Amino acid sequence: MFIIKNKPLRRREHQTLSIKVLDDKDHCRKRKKRKKNEKSKLCGIEMKAKTVKGNLSLRTNKLGFPYVFLICIFFFFAGFFASTLFSHSQEEGHGLRPRPRLLESTKEGKYNLMPSGETGDDSTTSIPFQVLSWKPRALYFPNFATAEQCESIIDVAKVGLKPSSLALRKGETEENTKGIRTSSGMFLSASEDKTGTLDVIEEKIARATMIPRTHGEAFNILRYEVNQRYNSHYDAFNPAEYGPQKSQRMASFLLYLTDVQEGGETMFPFENGLNMDGSYGYEDCIGLRVKPRQGDGLLFYSLLPNGTIDPTSLHGSCPVIKGEKWVATKWIRDHEQDV
Ligand SMILES: O=C(O)CCC(=O)C(=O)O
C-alpha cells in the first residue's frame, strides 16, 4: 500500500493534484527534495500537491492503493478509447484507405439527380431507344441526330469519297471480291471534322453505349447509289478466317444520314437463328430489315457477352432501289484504339 501524506489544509484553501510519470533517474534525483516540496513519488508516478486559496473542495490526506488503481484503470481505458478512435478514422478515409463516397439524391429538379462520381456529370441525357432484337442484340435510336447534323456530315464527306474496300480473308483478292461491297465512302475522325458535328455525335454514341470514345474507329461515311449494296458479312473478324487479331469489333453504330425512297435497308438475315441452314445466299435481302430514316441510329453487337462472335449478327445493306443512301458507321472495338 502506498500512502501520500499532505499537510492539512486550512479552510478556504483547496488542493490540486498533478500527476506525472517519472523515469528511474527522476525518481532518485527528486527523492531528497520530497519533504520540502510536498512531492511524493510512488511506483514511478509523481504526485504534486499544490495549495491554492479558495473553497476547500478536495481533501486528500491519504491517497492509497485504490486511488492509484483507479487512476491506472482510467489511463488504460483512455488509451484503449483513443486507439479505437484512431483506427476508425483510418478506415473512414482520414488515413490510408479512401473513404467511400456517399451518393444520395439531392432532390432537386425533375429527376432528383445524384451527385455524380468523379468521371460522371450532373445532368441527364434523354436518348430514347427501342430494342429491335436480342438475336442479334440490336437497338434503334430514333432522332439520334438532327437533319442539320446529318447534312453537315454529308457535306464534309462528299468531297473525299472513294470506292469502299473490304477486309480480305485468306485467299481473297480485290478481284474475286468485286461486287460484294459497291458503295463509296471515306473515313473521317471526329477531330478531322472541323464543323464539330462528328464530335457531338461521337460523344453521344459513347454515352448511349457506355463504351469510351477511345474504343471507336474513325467514322466510315458511306454513300450508296441506286443498285449499290453490301452483301451480308460480319463486322467482327474471325481469327480462323482473318488471322490473329489485336482487338475485335464488338459493336457497330450506324447513323442514317438520309431517308431512302426505296431499298437500302440494313438487313440481319440470321435474326433469331433463322436461315442458318447453309442455304442463304449473301445477297438475299431477308430477315430483320431496318429502313433508313434520316437522323436515326442503329446499334448492334457483334460479340456475345462471353466475347465470341454472335452468329446472328450477320448483316448487310440491301441494294438501293430508288434514291440515295448515306450512312455513318462507327465500329467500336473491345480494346482502345491506337491514336
Ligand atoms: O449500310 C448499311 O446499312 C450497313 C453497313 C455495314 O454493314 C457496315 O458498314 O458494316
Image (cartoon, helix red, strand yellow):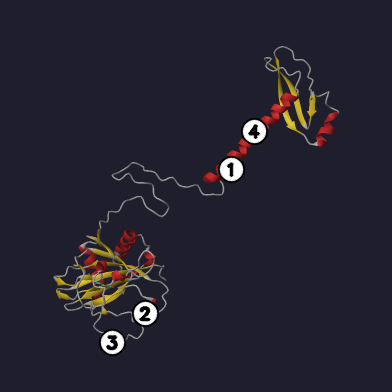
Asked if labels 3 and 2 touch by Cβ distance under 8 angstroms, the answer is no
Question: Which callout, 3 or 1, points at the residue further toward the start of the chain?
Answer: 1
Question: Which callout, 3 or 4, points at the residue further toward the start of the chain?
Answer: 4
The residue at which mark 2 appears reads as: 241
The alpha-carbon separation of the residues under discs 4 and 1 comes to 15 Å
Quarter of the figure with residue 183:
bottom left
Under mark 4, the amino acid is Phe
The residue at which mark 4 appears reads as: 77
Which is more foreground, mark 3 or mark 1? 3
Under mark 1, the amino acid is Ser
Instruction: Identify the residue at horizontal 21%, vertical 70% (top origin).
Output: 287
Question: Which callout, 2 or 1, points at the residue further toward the start of the chain?
Answer: 1
**On the rendered structure, is 56 left or right of 29?**
left
Q: Residue furthest front?
A: 277
**Coordinates of residue 177 in the picture (x, y in percent):** 28, 84
The residue at which mark 1 appears reads as: 87
Q: Could you tell me which secondary element the residue under label 3 belongs to?
A: loop
**Coordinates of residue 24 in the picture (x, y in percent):** 81, 36
Indicate which quadrant contains ligand 1.
bottom left
Q: Which mark is residue 176?
A: 3
Q: Residues within 10 Å of mark 1 (few under 14, many from 20)?
A: few
Q: Residue furthest bottom?
A: 175
**Coordinates of residue 243 in the picture (x, y in percent):** 40, 79
Q: Residues within 10 Å of mark 4 (few under 14, many from 20)?
A: few
Under mark 2, the amino acid is Glu
Question: Which callout, 4 or 2, points at the residue further toward the start of the chain?
Answer: 4
Residue at mark 4: C-beta within 8 A of ligand 1 = no
The alpha-carbon separation of the residues under discs 2 and 3 comes to 16 Å
Quarter of the figure with residue 128:
bottom left
Question: Which callout, 4 or 1, points at the residue further toward the start of the chain?
Answer: 4
